[in-house]
Image (tube, grey):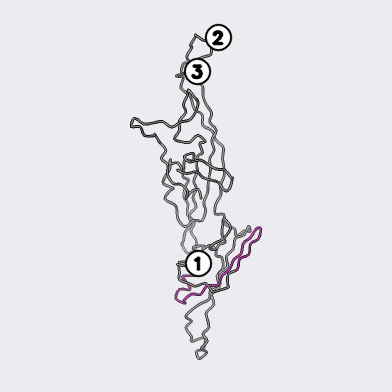
Amino acid sequence: MTAWSIIPCNEVISTRSETYEIDKTSCSVQLRVLAANKNALIEDLLVNRRTWPGSPIAVPPIARRVTAKPIIPVDTSHSNSAYVHEEFLVDVSYETSEGPDNEDLLSESLEPEAEFLKLPNTGFRWKTAQPSDIVPLNEGEAPGLLQPRLRLVRQMFLRNTVPSQMLLAGHVHNGSHFSQTFGLTFAAETLMLIPQPIGITRGTLNTGKYNYGATFVYKPTGWNKFLRLDTMTHEEILQPNGLVYKPYTPADLSVLLS
């Protein structure tokens, strides 16, 4: 496997070209390949949408056009019609643009939501004129608490595989996450995964690309911390064996966040 393809090929020296514009990136290279591997190379480049290696932009250009030319031997004793070409020069053009051919690979959004908690009446009392009078709240008088939250919704398009992390529904991310889109940092264990439906798009060659999404419900206080009524703060709690109780298991979800 080379930087260009899983099919063996060689880059022809001094043929790389990269052009970067505001709304378009174009790159090209010439590859040398054995005639027996020519068709497999073309299929791998186009069907698997090989990207330009080492691109400085977040979404690299994709292989879109390929031109194959046989290498004519120096020995002219054979006619072109009878000669069996042993190697080909393959010109590959890569491109990403804002035009109709542009392909969305990722979308990300932040959606507001809130959770309403009914607080227990235990521990609350009415404030009266006499400090010595303690009038507890009954169950129907217990107050509520509205906790604002966010949903970080990510949609991934035209991917070769579906990561196994999609099976970790209800887990929380075990590290901090910085969103390049919004410039926000989400602390560890504040993002809980809710997978979305997985779809597949098939082309004329019966090859497929996957589209899938992942929703992360953001809880600023952390999913494994709980409301302490006497201080109105969120803290960890311990199990009878002394270990921290974590009903939402931490896991590495960075594949779905990158």
Query: Residues under labels 2 and 3: Cα distance?
Result: 19 Å
Please tell me in which quadrant of the rendered image residue 183 appears: top right
Taking depth in this image into account, of 153 and 232 the one nearest to the observer is 232
For label 3, the crowd category at 10 Å Cα-Cα, with few meaning under 14, some 14 to 19 and many 20 or more, is: few
Q: Residue at x 53, y 47 (%)?
A: 154
What amino acid does circle 2 point to? Ala
Residue 106 place in picture, x, y as percent: 55, 51
For label 1, the crowd category at 10 Å Cα-Cα, with few meaning under 14, some 14 to 19 and many 20 or more, is: many
Q: Is residue 182 above or below residue 27?
A: above
Work out whether mark 1 precedes mark 2 in sequence or the reverse, and give the earlier one.
1
* Residue pointed to by mark 1: 4
* Residue pointed to by mark 3: 141
Quarter of the figure that contains the N terminus: bottom left
Read off the magenta span. 17-42
Which residue, as the protein is rendered here, is positioned at the far bottom?
77
What amino acid does circle 1 point to? Trp
Name the element at disc 1: loop
Please tell me in which quadrant of the rendered image residue 171 appears: top left
| Disc 1 to disc 2: CB gap under 8 Å | no
Residue 141 place in picture, x, y as percent: 50, 18
Query: Residues under labels 1 and 3: Cα distance?
Result: 68 Å
Residue 131 place in picture, x, y as percent: 52, 10
* Residue pointed to by mark 2: 129
